[in-house]
Image (tube, rainbow, N blue to C red):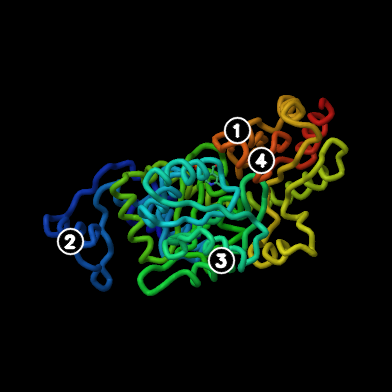
Amino acid sequence: MMSYGYKPELSEGAIKCPIFQTSTFVFKNAEEGKAFFEVAYGIREKRANEELGLIYSRLNNPDLEILENRLCLWDKAEECAVFESGMSAITTVLLEFLKPGDLLLYSMPVYGGTDHFINTFLPKIGVHVLGFKPGLAEGDIKKTVQDSGLSDRLAMIYIETPANPTNTIIDIEACARVATHFSNQDSQVLVAVDNTYMGPLWQHPLKHGADIVMYSATKYIGGHSDVIAGAVLAASGLMKRIKTLRTFLGNMASPNTGWLLMRSLETLKVRMEQQALNAEKVAQFLISHPKVAKVYYLGFIKEQSPAYGIFQKQCTSTGAMVSFNIKGGEKEAFVFLNHLKMIKLAVSLGSTESLAEHPASMTHAGIEEAHRLDMGITDSLIRLSIGVENYNDINWDIEQALGNV
Ligand SMILES: Cc1ncc(COP(=O)(O)O)c(C=O)c1O
């Protein structure tokens, strides 16, 4: 993965891919320009051994293409497209595959921004949306669709698993079977998975029957809280449509973002493994603390619960996200957050430094209160993203901050 897709001889022998900070690319002749556009705009299919030439950085750029090829290796995907944010990756997928009258079935909760787009924007363009909670059996998910009276218009099942901020998980294979059940010759129901919480290391949704996998690359992929980006991976047929909409919305990532993410990918595995190890220590510490009411952590899923089987099938790690209910409410949560000394009080996740936030008033503040509470995002909930620091320091900070509550 580290050297994949980059040829030093094309860049003065530079060992690392330089930043191709250029808006446009010079064609050798007019015929070449014409041929590149024919392929890029789908006027004709690519000939055998023909590669899409470099045209214009809204369509393609070496930093984006090499990064996309490397991301494909992690998820064993045919193609990838990188975006200027996770939200642009998600909204481009939703806009490309949903049209007025269609039904979108989505798992609850999802990231607050995604929830806002699904419940506030999509209905404005005539898309019907229907949420389902974790823990529903496959038959119940089917029944939810049937009872809506719109089962013939189901176009997509959108899943975020594990969910931000509650770490609840959804069975991707079961959703893929539900999608097949409601598909017919004329229309295929797609399964799209936001895999941000597991990063490309710990869960591979395409392997479990998903059609599309999406990331906020701002999180584990970027990993250093210095870049906003997104990625989508799928089979070539679907990616052609996604890339075409990206071309015309113009929401591709910049060359500099592509370069930063390539640099980040080289340490993805070591960063994430250290973060997971630290998270385990933090979760163990929190569970026995008298000021903590409940801990939401993949490592604490009970073996007897149906979620345990899903976890074992889908995830290869217990991850590095830990949420917990502090005893009390917003007041106690804020005292804790305001007394942290090393852990930063900031939204976002998956970075080298540990972060803490209050979902109800921050990342998920845009969600209508009753809907938010129904999903378990209460005023006492605190979300921690565990970094690569010494876990003794992280636990020391949590202990002293809880001591002020
Ligand atoms: C699970 C999840 N998906 C998507 C997003 C949106 O990504 P971005 O902030 O890169 O647009 C976030 C951001 O917090 C997220 O946590």
Q: Are marks 3 and 4 in contact (CB under 8 Å)?
A: no
Q: Secondary structure at mark 1?
A: loop
Graded by Cα atoms within 10 Å as few (under 14), some (14 to 19) or many (20 or more), the crowding at tag 3 reads some
Question: In this figure, which residue is indicated by the disc labeled 1?
Answer: 362
Total label count?
Answer: 4
Q: Where residue 325 appears, x then y in whole percent?
A: 76, 39
| Mark with earlier residue (3, 1) | 3
Per the image, the residue denoted by label 2 is: 35
Q: Quadrant of residue 330?
A: top right
Q: Badge 4 is on which residue?
A: 373
Q: Residue at point 47% right, 69% down?
A: 182
Residue 23 lies in what quarter of the image?
top left
Residue 19 placed where, x, y %?
A: 38, 44
Q: Secondary structure at mark 4?
A: helix
**Three-letter residue code for mark 3:** Lys
Secondary structure of the residue carrying tag 3 is helix
Of marks 3 and 1, the one in the foreground = 3
Q: Distance from label 2 to label 1 (Cα)?
A: 49 Å
